[in-house]
Amino acid sequence: VKNHWDKEKKQSRQKVIAYLGKAEGLEPSIVQKVFERDGAKCKRCERMDTLKFVRIIQNGLDEVNNLEILCTPCTKRKI
């Protein structure tokens, strides 16, 4: 997911959060909490594009403390 609020000012942050939640199959309330906690950027390198929600514990639950936002390059390095 690209950094929509820099490139497309028309689209609100809430719409982006809702989109991310639907795209990943996560509850929107959980998505919003993780999104705000991580500052809407990759937790490792602080990029703001190509973001994904990644489970910290692979087979863990979809809870706030088990999710982090990573960009595609950091997701690949995690594997």
Image: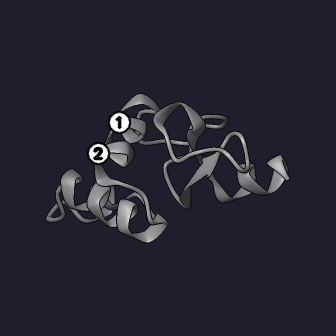
**Vertical relation: 42 (above or below) 19:** above
Q: Is mark 2 on a helix, strand or loop?
A: helix
Write down the residue under mark 2.
29
**Vertical relation: 61 (above or below) 39:** below
Q: Where is residue 5 in the image (x, y as percent from the top left)?
A: 28, 55
**Vertical relation: 15 (above or below) 28:** below
| Left or right of residue 79: residue 11 | left
| Left or right of residue 19: residue 13 | left
| Left or right of residue 42: residue 24 | left
Residue 34 location, quadrant: top left
Q: Position of residue 74 (x, y in %)?
A: 73, 49
- How far apart, in angstroms, are the residues tagged by discs 1 and 2? 6 Å
Q: Which residue is drawn at 71% across and 50% down?
A: 59
Query: Mark 2: which amino acid?
Result: Ser
Residue 47 location, quadrant: top right
Q: Position of residue 28 (x, y in %)?
A: 30, 53
Residue 71, labelled with which disc?
none
Write down the residue under mark 1.
33
Q: Which residue is drawn at 37% across and 43% down?
A: 30
Residue 57 location, quadrant: top right
**Front-most of residues 3 and 28:** 28
